Image (cartoon, rainbow, N blue to C red):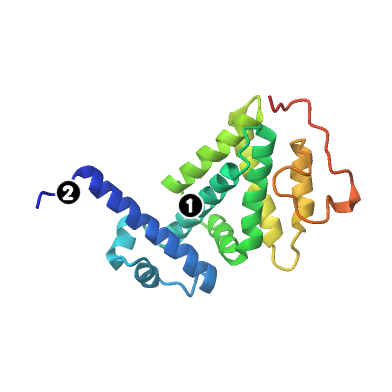
Amino acid sequence: MSPRSAEVNEELRRRSRERLLQATVELVDARGYEATKLGDIADRAGSARGLVSYYFPGKRQLLQSAVHRLMHLTLREALEREPRSEDGRERLARAIDAIMGLAAERPVLMRTHMAGILQADGFVQCPEQQQLAALLRDTVERYGCADVDAEYPLLRALLMGAVFAVLLPGAPMPRARLRAELFQRYGLDWGLGTPPDGGPPGGGPPVVPAQSSKSSE
């Protein structure tokens, strides 16, 4: 039997890494961070336990990469779902709804992720984060921002703040209100993306005038 090519080995490593990331999402979402052990993750992924340490320096870094992958996949699915749209305003609305939707659908996982970012180790730069950043940056560019380098990190910060506000224990903010604020800032029609039931908060008009500094052309 001939030895495997470098391309085959790389694909096997990629699949192994992805299984670990998926297992992390599933276990932390179901059990919480502290109750999830690295050995449990390896067992769920069907991988040798030593592979976890080979790919990731620790559990916190593994979790961040796992959540970044989930966010990337969720965002990509939202942007590519039917009916497909190349309209920059529709795509930005879908992006906002996709990221905020994770806070509502997976509160334990996203709360743990946000807590990890605020710890001493801070924000993990990993391939999964870079994929997420590239897709979100492309969304900002298609929306028509004049200065993508300035607007992309601002949008990222606004989305992180909105997720944090939705998940804040004891004093969460309504998701619809936060969505309305983001849509107003970017001049997005309330009906774009995946609007929640009930219309805009406060019974306001569903259409928000676009800001003059933005363009969907």
Q: Are marks 2 and 1 in contact (CB under 8 Å)?
A: no
**Residue 98 visible somewhere in the drawing:** yes
Which residue in the protein does label 2 denote? 4
The disc, 2 or 1, on the residue closer to the chain's N-terminal end is: 2
Residue, x 53% and y 67% (percent of image)?
29
Label 2 secondary element: loop
Q: Which mark is residue 69?
A: 1
Residue, x 52% and y 74% (percent of image)?
31
On screen, residue 210 versus residue 16, left or right, reads right
Indicate the position of residue 179 as horizontal and vertical percent values: 75, 49
- Residue 144: image quadrant is top right
Q: Nearer the viewer, residue 158 or 45?
A: 45
Residue 83 in the image: above or below residue 17: above
On screen, residue 216 versus residue 64, left or right, reads right
How packed mark 1 is, by other alpha carbons closer than 10 Å (few <14, some 14-19, many 20 or more), is: many
Residue, x 88% and y 43% (percent of image)?
205
**Residue type pointed to by label 1:** Arg
Q: Nearer the viewer, residue 38 or 217?
A: 217
On screen, residue 8 versus residue 114, left or right, reads left
Whole-Å distance between the Cαs marked 2 and 1? 27 Å
Residue 62 in the image: above or below residue 211: below
Indicate the position of residue 76 as horizontal and vertical percent values: 54, 45
**Residue type pointed to by label 2:** Arg
